[in-house]
Amino acid sequence: MRNTRRTSLRSAAVVAGTATVLALPVGSAFADPRAVPGPPEVLPSVEPAASVRAYVTTVKLADGSVAKVYKIGNSHFEADVLAGSMKLDTLVSKDGAASYGQNNGLHVVLRPNGTVTSWMDGAPKPQIRKESSVRITMPDGRIAKLVDGPHGKRVEISTPKGRAALATIDLRRPSVHHDGWTYRLVQDGKRVKFVVIDGKGGGNSRVYDFTGRLIEEYTADPAGQATGKDVKVVASGGGMAAADAAGLGFAVLQGQG
């Protein structure tokens, strides 16, 4: 596979280097015999920081080969393009620049966010799905950023006014607890919901969709809380399914939405 971006840069460097050499006057490449070289300058030895390739995902490409994506650091992704056990190329995306490669009619693009797209000659180029997000202020005063992007849905939780990040949850790591509150993502059919549970308040909860709209609200039964027993759930609009899927573990009295 030929990496168009890297190959072009490499070719340009060779041409520029050749032009520089040809521009030198005759004899300038030789040292002046009258000049006495001084002692070589000793530079401090600096060991380069080791880069760790953290595996992200494997993407099946348009011709049946695969791209294994790795994150090296901030704004730095690499994708090994493999046909069976043979590595065809490694695409490198750094500092916001995409990386392109092609081989036998296959086109592959590694985007700055680590996503990979591919297509074959003659096929329409796939449309890139952009990331969208909305911010909400939760009942505890903290900020939740609900993000829907190429890698799926996630929620980024931060302190009030969004000054410091606290946690990020997605469907692979769907739940986090902080200071008596629980934040959880729930897959309800094709829909993904964001549940905020007030553990300090006895288990009251709110459920949001990914437009930031409050779609369900539940109140824990004080009697059920006192006895430590669940009370029969009375909910509407799919509330029962949402409560079961979330595994809330507390009594629910009413639902809205």
Image: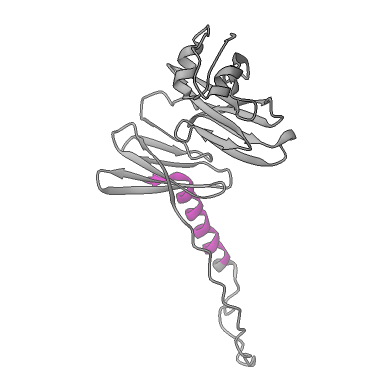
The outermost residue toward the right is 161
Which image quadrant: the N terminus? top left
The outermost residue toward the top is 236
Q: What span is colored magenta in the figure?
A: 2-20
Count numbered badges in the picture: 0
Q: Quadrant of residue 163?
A: top right
Which image quadrant: the C terminus? top right
What's the colour scheme?
Answer: one colour
Q: Position of residue 229 (x, y in %)?
A: 49, 21
Between residue 217 and residue 61, name the one nearer to us: 217
Q: Is residue 200 magenta?
A: no
Q: Residue at x 53, y 18 (%)?
A: 251
Residue 220 visible, this orientation = no
Q: Position of residue 148 (x, y in %)?
A: 54, 26
Q: Main secondary structure of the magenta part?
A: helix
Q: Residue at x 45, y 44 (%)?
A: 4
Residue 249 visible, this orientation = yes
Please determine whether, in this image, residue 11 is positioned above or below residue 227: below
Q: Position of residue 120 (x, y in %)?
A: 35, 30
Q: Is residue 17 magenta?
A: yes
Q: Residue at x 58, y 19 (%)?
A: 207
Between residue 106 and residue 96, name the one nearer to us: 96
